[in-house]
């Protein structure tokens, strides 16, 4: 006669963040998703800009004052960082789709390059904006 256990079967644990060792491609993957969500939220800012522009000079002035505040500039800085990182991540994925950069070292270099490009491009845009008086 066969004995069948009555309790729940031991099942393997699903891997989670405490099991995996953090590496740059993991951070790059997470950052791509986070910046994508951020860009969706930035679309709401763009829609608010269009609505304020259509609502007249008073509404547009209030919108400009809101985005011209230190908090507004911080949000815009984050949006530009998100834009440039997401752009670089898209190029990285396009390179992978072409079949290149799939080895671990190459993927790590592409991930670091994505972060570096995002930081450099964001700083360049904001420095130029400051130099021409757009801030």
Image (cartoon, rainbow, N blue to C red):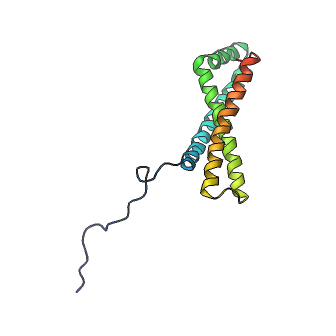
Q: Is residue 61 above or below residue 42?
A: above
Q: Is residue 9 above or below residue 104?
A: below
Q: Is residue 2 visible?
A: yes
Residue 18 placement (x, y as % from top left) = 40, 50
Residue nearer the viewer, 112 or 134: 112
Residue 73 vs residue 55: left or right? left
Q: Residue at x 71, y 47 (%)?
A: 91
Residue at the outermost front position: 105
Residue nearer the viewer, 7 or 114: 114
Q: Residue at x 66, y 45 (%)?
A: 89
Q: Quadrant of the N terminus?
A: bottom left
- Label count reads 0
Residue 98 placement (x, y as % from top left) = 73, 58
Residue nearer the viewer, 58 or 98: 98
Residue at the outermost right position: 132
Residue 7 placement (x, y as % from top left) = 25, 68
């Amino acid at each position: 006669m066969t004995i069948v256990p009555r309790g729940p079967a031991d099942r393997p644990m699903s891997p989670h963040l405490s099991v995996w060792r953090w590496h740059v491609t993991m951070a790059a993957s997470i950052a791509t998703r986070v910046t994508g969500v951020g860009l969706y939220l930035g679309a709401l800012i763009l829609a608010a800009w269009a609505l304020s522009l259509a609502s007249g000079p008073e509404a547009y002035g209030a919108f400009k004052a809101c985005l011209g505040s230190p908090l507004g500039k911080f949000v815009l800085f984050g949006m530009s960082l998100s834009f440039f990182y997401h752009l670089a991540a898209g190029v990285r994925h396009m390179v992978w789709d072409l079949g290149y950069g799939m080895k671990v070292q190459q993927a790590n270099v592409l991930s670091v390059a994505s972060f570096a490009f995002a930081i450099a491009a964001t700083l360049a845009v904001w420095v130029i904006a400051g130099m021409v008086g757009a801030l």
